[in-house]
Image (cartoon, rainbow, N blue to C red):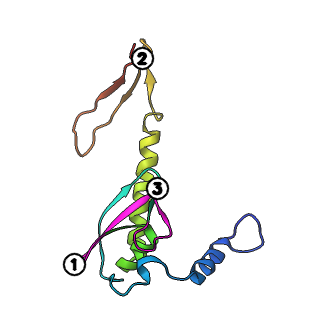
Amino acid sequence: MACDCGEHECDHERKIFVSTLPSSGKWKDKVTPKSLWKCQDVEDLGSSNLLCQMCEREHVRYAHTMQHDNHENLTLVCICAAHMEGDLNASKERESYLHSRQKRRVGWLDSGSKTSKNGNFYKKTRKNSHDEASHHIVMIKSK
């Protein structure tokens, strides 16, 4: 995929750049297992204040909590989790799901909300797998 600058493929250039970086953090030690990890949980932290506990270089927004039988749990960025789990697609899908979920939550109220006669926002929900009835959700302005 080429970028707008037209001079090179940015995705390809990033791969070359990342591959030339020296290993860092726990990737360099001989104690931490580098494979056979399983993802226990993925969480959107809302900001990137946490540093990946494996590479100790990348900032974590979507925290993949990884579990191993012979090591304590670690909180990682997507790419480190993918390497430790041995499945890049699974790691990307988990992160993509959280990202799209966050976008849906932010845009939920704006999509299809109406204003009542009293000036309050309301939204009618539809039937779903968890609830067989539709509901009206009303937000009342406080005084």
Specify the quadrant of the image occupied by residue 80.
bottom left
Nearer to us of marks 3 and 1 is 3
Q: Can you give x and y, in whole percent of width and height, for residue 136 in the image?
A: 32, 26
State the mark number for residue 139: none
Dot 2 amino acid type: Ser
Residue on which disc 3 sits: 49
Residue at x-position 40% and y-position 50%: 101
Say which element carries label 2: loop
Dividing the image into 4 quarters, which one contains the N terminus?
bottom right
Instruction: Report the side of 79 relative to 20 (left or right).
Output: left
Specify the quadrant of the image occupied by residue 38.
bottom left
Nearer to us of marks 2 and 3 is 3
Residue on which disc 1 sits: 69
Q: Can you give x and y, in whole percent of width and height, for residue 139 in the image?
A: 37, 23
Residue range highlighted in magenta:
52-73
Dot 3 amino acid type: Asn
Say which element carries label 1: loop
Q: Crowding at label 2, few (<14), some or many (≥20) Cα neighbours within 10 Å? A: few
Say which element carries label 3: loop
State the mark number for residue 116: 2
Dot 1 amino acid type: Asp
Which residue is nearer to you in this view: 112 or 105? 105
Residue at x-position 22% and y-position 44%: 130
